[in-house]
Image (cartoon, helix red, strand yellow):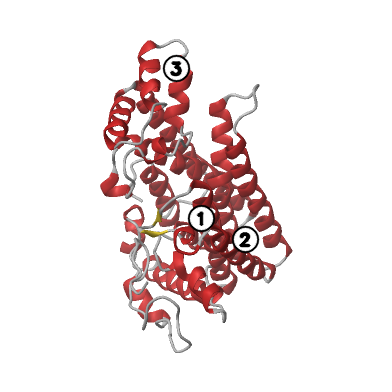
């Protein structure tokens, strides 16, 4: 894997392919900074004469330290750990750490380390998620379990989380507690998604809870850690936690709708992927609820629950679900979470950081990121 590509990530060529040799050298931080591109939602950061260069340089340091953190003397562990980092990614969580730090003192070295920790944690969960979902691709590349098998992929996720834990342990007990509670929520979210709602539990409420644990928790921790190590007042830290939870949920709910609206060009996601894999997303959950009293919803649900093996059957199910009012209802729910995230920012001082966070929340439901 010689080319590293992805929005918000550097692109350069390593000396070889497959297993790295001991003479491979990552590019210097200054070279990385020249190649980093921020997602469109954060364009105003790039245009700011002070914040822009600072964020670019910090992201470059994060990228360099990410590779240092997962480097391993064992050739197989090194190759598997590099797999997803070198496939790219937007680095949204590290970026939120850095943005939060600019509400205080962003120059402290702990800020960069915290940004590395949240991205490593995110990467570890992706290895596990791909095994559980039997996903063939991630970020345009074959998933680790497709290349090395399930056991190696799971152990690689564990190894990367171990590296994140080592780093966060050096940041002190408060950061370690945040990391541990966040990972607990990530695991519980996956567990609850796997077993489904209890008989007495509303499926939509259950799903929102799952999304909050699986996505919102780590986004919230990102802002919180950035603020803590930049010595931002606790009141502002709490604002960023609330914002992170809400924007994380908005992001995932929007992703659900994208599966049936065909926004492949901007999201990279083929329409109907979740339907074919029987993933219980918000549009389908709302459709099931509506089908109890709405014959049109029941007719669409019959298509959705049918055999979606063929592309023709999948296209028919996607088209029917896209046209049904539950899809627009799902957009409305996602937008509400986005609007609530923006509202949570009210106590923060006006400025480019607050504006960028608000724009990001709006962008996740317009899928500009």
* 3D distance between C-alphas at marks 1 and 3: 33 Å
Residue to which mark 2 is pinned: 228
Left or right of 225: which side holds 142? left
Decide: marks 3, 2 in contact (CB < 8 A)? no
Query: Measuring 33% from the left and 78% from the top, which residue is drawn there?
Result: 13
Does label 2 or label 1 sit earlier along the sequence? 1
Total labels drawn: 3
* 3D distance between C-alphas at marks 3 and 2: 44 Å
Residue to which mark 3 is pinned: 290
Does label 1 or label 3 sit earlier along the sequence? 1
**How would you rate the neighbour count of disc 2 (Cα within 10 Å): few for under 14, some for 14-19, many for 20 or more?**
many
Q: Quadrant of residue 272?
A: top left
What is the x, y in percent for residue 175?
A: 67, 61
Closer mark to the observer between disc 3 and disc 2: 3
Compared to residue 166, the image places residue 331 above or below, namely: above
What is the x, y in percent for residue 102?
A: 49, 62
Q: Nearer the viewer, residue 236 or 350?
A: 236
What is the x, y in percent for residue 246?
A: 52, 41
Query: Measuring 33% from the left and 48% from the top, which residue is drawn there?
Result: 267
Residue to which mark 1 is pinned: 126
Closer mark to the observer between disc 2 and disc 1: 1
Compared to residue 178, the image places residue 114 above or below, namely: below
The quarter of the picture where the N terminus appears is bottom left
Compared to residue 308, the image places residue 362 above or below, namely: below
């Amino acid at each position: 894997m010689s080319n590293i590509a992805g929005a918000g990530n550097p692109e350069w060529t390593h000396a070889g392919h497959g297993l790295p040799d001991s003479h491979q050298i990552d590019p210097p931080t200054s070279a990385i900074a020249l190649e980093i591109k921020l997602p469109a939602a954060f364009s105003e950061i790039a245009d700011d004469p002070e914040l822009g260069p600072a964020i670019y340089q910090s992201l470059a340091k994060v990228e360099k330290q990410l590779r240092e953190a997962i480097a391993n003397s064992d050739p197989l562990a090194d190759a598997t750990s590099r797999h997803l980092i070198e496939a790219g990614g937007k680095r949204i969580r590290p970026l939120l750490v850095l943005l939060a730090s600019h509400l205080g003192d962003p120059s402290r070295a702990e800020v960069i380390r915290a940004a590395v920790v949240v991205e490593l944690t995110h990467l570890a969960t992706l290895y596990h998620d791909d095994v559980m979902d039997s996903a063939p691709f991630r970020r345009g590349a074959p998933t680790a379990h497709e290349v090395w098998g399930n056991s190696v992929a799971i152990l690689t996720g564990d190894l990367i989380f171990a590296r994140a834990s080592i780093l966060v342990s050096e940041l002190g007990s408060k950061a370690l507690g945040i990391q541990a509670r966040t990972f607990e929520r990530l695991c519980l979210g996956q567990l609850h998604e796997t077993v489904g709602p209890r008989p007495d539990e509303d499926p939509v409420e259950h799903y929102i809870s799952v999304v909050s644990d699986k996505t919102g928790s780590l986004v919230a921790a990102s802002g919180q850690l950035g603020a803590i190590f930049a010595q931002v007042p606790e009141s502002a830290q709490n604002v960023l936690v609330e914002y992170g939870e809400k924007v994380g949920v908005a992001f995932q709910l929007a992703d659900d709708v994208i599966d049936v609206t065909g926004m492949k060009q901007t999201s990279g996601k083929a329409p109907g992927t979740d339907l074919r894999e029987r993933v219980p997303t918000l549009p389908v959950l709302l459709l099931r609820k509506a089908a109890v009293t709405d014959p049109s919803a029941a007719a669409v649900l019959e298509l959705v629950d049918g055999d979606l093996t063929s592309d023709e059957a999948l296209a028919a199910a996607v088209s029917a679900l896209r046209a049904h009012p539950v899809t627009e209802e799902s957009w409305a729910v996602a937008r509400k979470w986005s609007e609530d995230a923006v509202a949570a920012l009210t106590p923060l001082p006006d400025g480019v950081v607050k504006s960028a966070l608000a724009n990001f929340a709006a962008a996740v439901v317009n899928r500009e990121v």
